Image (cartoon, rainbow, N blue to C red):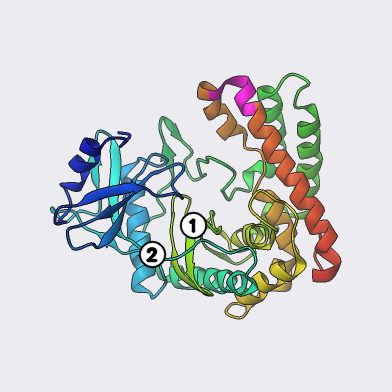
């Protein structure tokens, strides 16, 4: 169900115990899932979310339970509203819908060092409080594609070490047989070989593991002043080395602006110091940061193969080119900043 009309939304809202709810409009940050701002007769505001990216009921239930654990542990996020039947969500025409109390605030301000530090500190808190969550890790399932313990992606928000095996090169070359993507394939093959040698599975497994958000960026959270008031969007939560989230965070909170790959040393430092004020990193974790930052954007043959049905060869070629462009840009920036941080760049 794609809720595009008032009657569509009304059918969903009737399942929730609200007094005369009205949809005020789409939430501006909702570009993949179906997010609507809702108000009731008393003027209280809510966020209604239709899960277009992840529709598996088991996965949605896991995400809601995970979010409830965060809130109960004192971590800032949105409180879910139960349906009239006491359920966490309702499914209408194949799409799960959940309702949350609206959290006021603004997205990350790229000019605020204090917010960059707060983002780092809150990420450390996220990793700490979720250590007590012992529910099942339900994998992401999208449409007909079950990626088992991998993460289905809209972009490269995922943790996997299987992309470092030699067979992944072969799968990519089977998908992209022409010359259009030869430069990207050559770059990835060279990087993969160096990364696999530097970070074999045994070394990766020794890094401290945690629950990962995997999509930790400034539009998935809101701030009031320097304080984070809410973290959202748990579509990609999984387990892995906590440095994966940190590598992504260095990029998201260190860059100059959205769409840029240019990193600012003082913002990268503020983010990392914010994290380490609550959870110091080991020397090995610090060494892993540049590798993890680039790993966030590795090409994924399984994902491209799944998207090929809808997007064709040209569509997945554009995705490959965009992913490798990000890898190149971030690797260059991590190498430029390496002397200031003592990083080792693959």
Q: Main secondary structure of the magenta part?
A: helix
Q: Left or right: where does residue 276 sit relative to residue 89?
A: right
Q: Is residue 195 above or below residue 123?
A: above
* Residue 163 can be seen in this image: yes
- Residue 188: x and y in percent read 76, 39
- In front of the other: 178 or 10: 10
Query: Element under label 1?
Result: loop
Report the number of discs: 2
Q: In front: mark 1 or mark 2?
A: 1
Identity of the residue drawn at 40% across and 42% down: 54
Task: Confirm or deny contact between disc 1 and disc 2 (CB under 8 A).
Answer: no
Q: Whole-percent x and y of residue 252?
A: 63, 58
According to the picture, the residue beneath numbered tag 2 turns out to be 134
Q: Position of residue 28 (x, y in %)?
A: 44, 49
Residue ID at (86%, 67%): 339
Which residue lies at the image location 64% right of the left edge and 33% below the top edge? 319
Q: Which residues are magenta?
A: 311-316
Where is 64 relative to 182, above or below?
below
- Is residue 167 visible to us here? no
Q: Is residue 224 inside the magenta stretch? A: no
Residue 241 in percent (x, y) is at: 60, 61
Q: Quadrant of residue 264?
A: bottom right
Q: Where 180 falls versus 238 (above or below)?
A: above
Q: Earlier in the sequence, mark 1 or mark 2?
A: 2
Q: Which residue is label 1 attached to? A: 220
């Amino acid at each position: 169900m794609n809720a595009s009309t008032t009657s569509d939304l009304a059918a969903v809202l009737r399942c929730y115990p609200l007094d005369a709810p009205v949809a005020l409009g789409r939430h501006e940050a909702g570009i993949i899932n179906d997010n609507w701002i809702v108000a009731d007769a008393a003027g209280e505001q809510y966020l209604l979310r239709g899960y277009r990216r992840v529709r598996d009921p088991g996965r949605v239930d896991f995400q809601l339970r995970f979010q409830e654990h965060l809130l109960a542990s004192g971590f800032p996020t949105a409180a879910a509203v139960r349906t009239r039947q006491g359920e966490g969500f309702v499914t209408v025409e194949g799409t799960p819908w959940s309702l949350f109390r609206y959290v006021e605030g603004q997205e990350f301000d790229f000019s605020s060092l204090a917010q960059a530090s707060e983002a780092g500190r809150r990420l450390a808190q996220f990793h700490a409080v979720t250590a007590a969550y012992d529910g099942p890790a339900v994998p992401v399932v999208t449409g007909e594609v079950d990626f088992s313990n991998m993460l289905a992606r809209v972009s490269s928000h995922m943790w996997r070490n299987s992309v470092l095996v030699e067979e992944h090169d072969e799968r990519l070359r089977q998908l992209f047989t022409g010359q259009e993507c030869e430069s990207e394939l050559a770059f990835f093959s060279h990087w993969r070989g160096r990364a696999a040698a530097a970070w074999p599975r045994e070394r990766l497994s020794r890094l401290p593991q945690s629950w990962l958000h995997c999509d930790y960026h400034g539009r998935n959270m809101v701030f009031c002043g320097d304080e984070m008031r809410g973290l959202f969007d748990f579509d990609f939560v999984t387990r892995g080395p906590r440095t994966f989230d940190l590598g992504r965070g260095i990029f998201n909170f260190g860059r100059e602006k959205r769409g840029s790959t240019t990193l600012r040393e003082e913002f990268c430092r503020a983010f990392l110091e914010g994290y380490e004020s609550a959870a110091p990193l080991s020397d090995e974790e610090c060494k892993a940061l540049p590798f993890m930052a680039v790993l966030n954007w590795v090409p994924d043959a399984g994902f491209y193969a799944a998207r090929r049905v809808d997007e064709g060869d040209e569509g997945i070629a554009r995705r490959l080119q965009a992913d490798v462009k990000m890898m190149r840009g971030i690797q260059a920036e991590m190498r430029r900043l390496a002397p200031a941080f003592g990083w080792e760049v693959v």
